[in-house]
Amino acid sequence: MIQYQVLQKEELCQELFRDFIRHQEVTKCWRYEKDQWIIKEEPFIDDWTEADYQILISCLKNTVDTGGFVYGAFENGKLKGFVSVEALLFGGEQKYLDLTSIHVSEDMRGKGIGRALFLVAKKWAKEKGAKKLYISAHSAVESQAFYKAMGCVEAAVYHPRHVEEEPYDCQLECQL
């Protein structure tokens, strides 16, 4: 049985991610070329190093410190999914809140954890006064299928920092 909880800053450490498997084998990705979105063969393996986990933990701690939301999914006390949303509204009339991460451990994908995490992130963002979630999303076909199933569409306004940091990500929004 999956249990969900808000994660506190002191819980965000390397040990929390000991049983989390980020691994994702990507074969096809969405790319914007010649004024249209197309699917291209772009095979690679997406995985996190120890250094990547340290950066992630630092970012999640900052999210908590700045009033944001970090929420985890656990099976038998082991982290199997998490989501984070920043607390700062942006995008003018769009009133976006930034969903900065949502990940499900490879061994638990396809069991509804991502959907549950996404829905609680939407609820939290709406309670904070946002109109939409903003997502700079992995361009893998499977990732984009998830976001589309969750009601996401291309963002009306792009966040320049996200575009600069992850030029191959798809910039999405989801109405709350």
Image: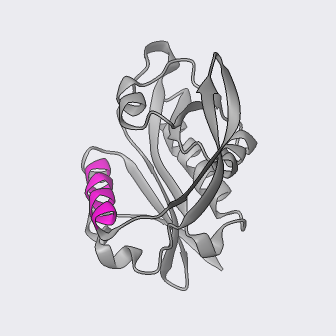
Is 175 situated left or right of 127 in this image?
right
Residue at 50% x, 36% y: name it.
168
Q: Is 47 situated above or below 86?
A: below
**x, y percent for residue 86:** 38, 41
Instruction: Pick out the residue farthest to the bottom.
Output: 76
Type of colouring: one colour
Instruction: Give the quarter of the image for residue 152.
Output: top right
**x, y percent for residue 176:** 62, 33
Nearest the viewer among 117 and 35 is 35
Q: Mark yes or no: residue 175 visible.
A: no
Q: Is 127 situated above or below 101?
A: above
**Main secondary-structure element of the magenta-colored stretch:** helix
**x, y percent for residue 82:** 49, 61
Magenta region, residue range: 51-63
Q: Mark yes or no: residue 143 visible.
A: yes
> Does the stretch in magenta take in 55?
yes
Residue at 72% x, 65% y: name it.
110
